[in-house]
Image: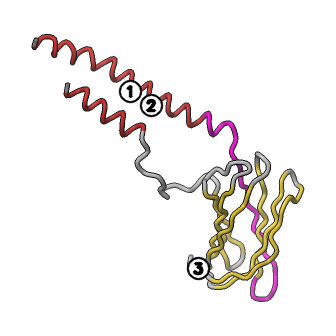
Amino acid sequence: MRISIVLFVFLLFSIIPIIREASAHAQFNSAESTIGNNRVQIATVPEIPIINEKCTIRIHVTDLDLKDVQGFTMGMRIFYNDVQVDGISPQSRDGGYWDFDYVFKRQGNHIFRVDLYDSDGKVITHTFNMSTQSPFAYIFTYVIGVGAAGAAAIVGYIYLPKRLKKLRARF
């Protein structure tokens, strides 16, 4: 009986995700670039955007000491297969962050050319690759799930018969 409870708790915690979001690793769709006196970071939320669904693009601009740049002007050009598919005209931002919603229309790799304007009006372009959901992400998720279920089955196959013999011996 005890092993059944332990096995149930193990399976329960291995199937249900406890931690929804953590930043212990770099996100899949995140990158940073340092040119001149500024460092620009970009990321998508969710990590892997889904076609025709809204996602958030997060941009963080810091100086070389990693302190937020308090005011900056930035624009963006978005390319797919070397053809510009979208653009955002230059905007002035207060603080070091810029979050905006975006909808990817095509599956695959998109090139984001982020144009940062310095105080002299000079444009510094940071280039980033951003990818959208592909069938491989689904396959990867299913493979991990099947692997966990297989490991649980093997552990159960090895230890459960021994426990059942002990329980039968008591009765």
Which region shows up in magenta?
118-139
Where does the image place residue 143, in percent across and percent down from the top left? 55, 31
Where does the image place residue 32, in percent across and percent down from the top left? 65, 64
Q: CA distance from mark 2 to mark 1?
A: 6 Å
User: Residue 85: which numbered mark, if any?
Assistant: none
Residue at which label 2 appears: 148
Say whether residue 89 is left or right of residue 16: right
Residue at which label 3 appears: 68
Which residue type does callout 3 highlight?
Asp
| Dot 3 or dot 2, earlier in sequence | 3
Say whether residue 112 is left or right of residue 148: right
Q: Badge 1: how crowded within 10 Å, few (<14), some, or many (20+)?
A: some
Q: Which element type, helix, strand or loop, lies under badge 1?
A: helix
Residue at the image position 73 percent from the left and 82 percent from the top: 92
Which quadrant would the N terminus be assigned to in this image?
top left
Q: CA distance from mark 3 to mark 2?
A: 42 Å
Q: Is residue 28 magenta?
A: no
Which quadrant would the C terminus be assigned to in this image?
top left
